[in-house]
Amino acid sequence: MFLSAAGGTITTALSALFFYLSRNQDAYQKLAHEIRSNFTSSTEIRGTALAGCTYLRACIDEAMRLSPPAPGILWRDLAPDDDESQPFVVDGHVVPPHTIVGVNTYSLHHNEDYFPDAFAYRPERWLASSDFSPEEKKVMREAFAPFSVGPRGCAGKAMAYLECSLVMARTLWYFDFESTAGELGEVGAGKVGLEDGRERRGEFQLYDTFSASHDGPYLTFVARGDFWKDL
Ligand code: HEM
């Protein structure tokens, strides 16, 4: 359980992050600038300085919003020791005993009522300084649930953010990257002619098994000067 919770989810989160950054130059340039101006050597890329990279966090959250590593429905019902003499009420609806209920995370994250411009990769929506109103930001924050919520939510959330942050920040320290030329560079992307809902080229495609699986992305990395010699 621990390995499957930690491994598949992290690889999907990182793959989605690389995919969206390779296709959104504005976000890529802002993130590369944040990493390359906040640190003076690769060994500094850790701890509170890394946690303080707000654009990096926004990029990670926006990738997990668009392509949540656990994209399906996390079913719930009353626990055996819950008091069934009291009605189980969800958002004003009485749910009869022994009924399972759940919310699909992919749908939640693409609901225009919660996320304006829901299919666009816009890390700015997570920044304090963004154009979104405080009310819009509050709604988005509350509707964002890649790790689920409550007592059965993800036990590894902090580690997940640390892993994603470290991998992306250190990659951008040592390399530039872009989508690989030709057909391989399109692996993982939506395409006209695929099944309904999979036609958006800019969207990283997920296949919901127990946790999500995916294809690609294939990227080409170019070393930045001589920095790689520290490795
Ligand atoms: C981006 C990465 C990750 C995402 C999106 C994610 C997402 C989730 C979600 C949605 C659940 C709730 C499942 C449910 O309610 O049925 C969960 C549970 C869990 N996660 Fe993660 N996870 C991630 C990384 C990790 C890592 C790195 C670890 C461990 C180091 C981990 C350990 C766990 C464990 C142990 C549970 C079960 C908690 C419980 O049932 O009490 N996860 N995760």
Image (tube, grey):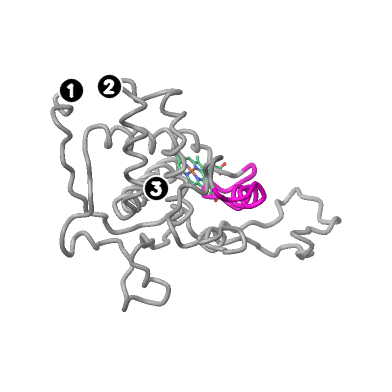
- In the rendered structure, which segment of residues is drawn in magenta? 131-151
| Mark nearer the N terminus (3 vs 2) | 3
Quadrant in the rendering for residue 168: top left
Sequence-first tag of 3 and 1: 3
Q: Residue at x 37, y 62 (%)?
A: 203
Q: Which residue is mark 3?
A: 13
Query: Which one is closest to the eye, mark 2 or mark 1?
Result: 2
Amino acid type, callout 2 = Ser
Q: Is mark 3 within 8 Å of ligand 1?
A: yes
**Residue at mark 3 to residue at mark 2: CA–CA distance:** 26 Å
Where's residue 159, x and y in %? 45, 33
Q: Which residue is mark 2?
A: 41
Q: Which residue is mark 1?
A: 230
Q: Residue at x 61, y 58 (%)?
A: 114
Asked if labels 1 and 2 touch by Cβ distance under 8 angstroms, the answer is: yes
Q: Amino acid at mark 1?
A: Asp
From the viewer's side, name the closer residue of 183 and 130: 130
Q: What type is the residue that disc 3 sits on?
A: Ala
- 183 or 125: nearer the viewer: 125
Q: Is residue 19 above or below residue 2?
A: below
Mark closer to the observer (3, 2): 2
Question: x and y percent of residue 22 in the render?
Answer: 29, 51
Query: Callout 2 environment at 10 Å: few (<14), some (14 to 19), or many (20+)?
Result: few
Query: Spatial distance from mark 2 to mark 1, Cα to Cα?
Result: 9 Å
